[in-house]
Image: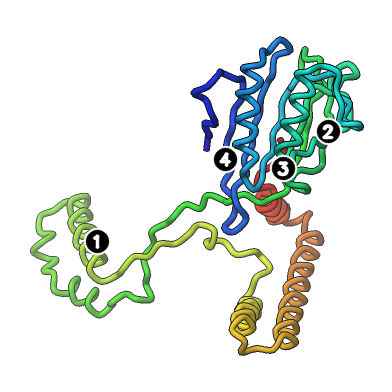
Amino acid sequence: MELHLGMDEEPTESLWVRIKGRAGAGDIIVGVCYRPPDQGDRADEALYRQIGAASHSQALALMGDFNHPDICWRDNAAGHKQSRKFLECIDDNFLLQVIEEPTRRGAMLDLLLTNKEGLVGDVKLKGSLGCSDHEMVEFRILRAARRAHSKLTTLDFRRADFGLFRDLLGRMPWDKALEERGAQDSWLIFKGHLLQAQERCIPTKRKSSKNTKRPPWMNKELLGKVKQRKEAYRGWKQGQVAWEEYRETVRAARAQVRKAKALTELNLARDVKDNKKSFYRYVSDKRRTRENVGVL
C-alpha cells in the first residue's frame, strides 16, 4: 500500500509503501528515493521530514541514491554542509546504514537505511545493470509479511439436512416437469430444483485458502499431536498445566513432526527419478512459503 508522507510539501523523488506484517509483528515501511546532486536545501528538508515520519514505524527499510560521496561512514563525518545535515537526520531518527562497499566508482552513493537492527540481511552488490555505472544492491527483509488469503465459500456438509434434501427432491413430480422437454431444458430444470434444495438444506461456510492444503507429511496422528500441544499451551497460560508437562508435550510433538518431515523428504529424494512432479512440487511449495517479502 502506497503511503503519502508530506507529499504536499516541496516535491522529492521518493516513494513509500507499507507491507502488511503478520498479526502481532507490525507492518514494514519500505521507501526508495533519489536525491539529485544539485538538490536544494528546501527539498532536502522535505525529504528529511518524510524520513522522520517513516522512522516512527516499528520497521523501516529505506534505500536509494542519496549522492553524498564525501560522507565517511566509518567515522560518521562529512565535509559538506548538506552531507552533515543528512547525517544529523540519520542520527536524529536512529537509523543504521548497512552498506559497507562503494556502489559507484569508489564512492558509496547508494545507501540502505533501517531503524531496526536485524530487519535486513544478505546485503550483496551484484554488478551494474545495463549501461548504469552503479552497483545493484540486493538484500532481504528478514520478516514474514502477511499473506493475502482469499476467502472461499464452500458447502458445509457436516451441518446439512440430507433428510429434508431428499424429501424436497422426492416430492417433485419429475415426469410432469420434464415431459416433452429436450435434454438441455431437462437438465436446466433439474439443476434449478437441485440448487434450490441445496440452498435450503446445506449451509455454507467461509474457508481460508491457507487451510486448503496440508503439508504432505501431515497425517491424522500428527494433527492430534499438534492439537495436544495447543491445548497444553492454553492450559499452561491458564495455570492448569505445569511448565514441565507443557515442555514435554511440545518436545514430543516437535520430534514427531521432524521425523515425519524427514521421512517424507527421504522418500521424495529416493523416488525422484520415477516421480519428479511430486519432488519439484514439494520444493516449489517450500520456497513459496518461506520467501514472503523476497529479494529487493
Quarter-of-image position of residue 206:
bottom left
Label whose residue precedes the other's in the sequence (3 or 2): 2
Amino acid residing under circle 2: Ile
- On the question of residue 86 being in view, the answer is yes
Amino acid residing under circle 1: Leu
Label whose residue precedes the other's in the sequence (4 or 1): 4
Q: Which residue is mark 4?
A: 18
Residue 271 position in % (x across, y down) = 78, 60
Q: Nearer the viewer, mark 4 or mark 3?
A: 3
The 10 Å Cα crowd at callout 2, few under 14, some 14 to 19, many 20 or more, is: some
Label whose residue precedes the other's in the sequence (1 or 2): 2
Amino acid residing under circle 3: Asn
Q: Is residue 256 left or right of residue 160?
A: right
Scheme of image coloration: rainbow
Q: Is residue 185 left or right of residue 162?
A: left
Tell me which residue sits at (54%, 58%) in the image. 210
Q: Which residue is mark 2?
A: 99
Q: CA distance from mark 3 to mark 2?
A: 14 Å
Residue 115 disc label: 3
Q: CA distance from mark 2 to mark 4?
A: 22 Å
Check the image and report above or below for 68 versus 256: above
The 10 Å Cα crowd at callout 1, few under 14, some 14 to 19, many 20 or more, is: few
Residue 216 position in % (x across, y down) = 66, 65
Residue 94 position in % (x across, y down) = 74, 41
Q: Which residue is mark 1?
A: 195
Q: CA distance from mark 4 to mark 3?
A: 15 Å
CB atoms at circles 1 and 2 under 8 Å apart? Answer: no
Report the front residue among 179 and 294.
Answer: 294
Quarter-of-image position of residue 24:
bottom right
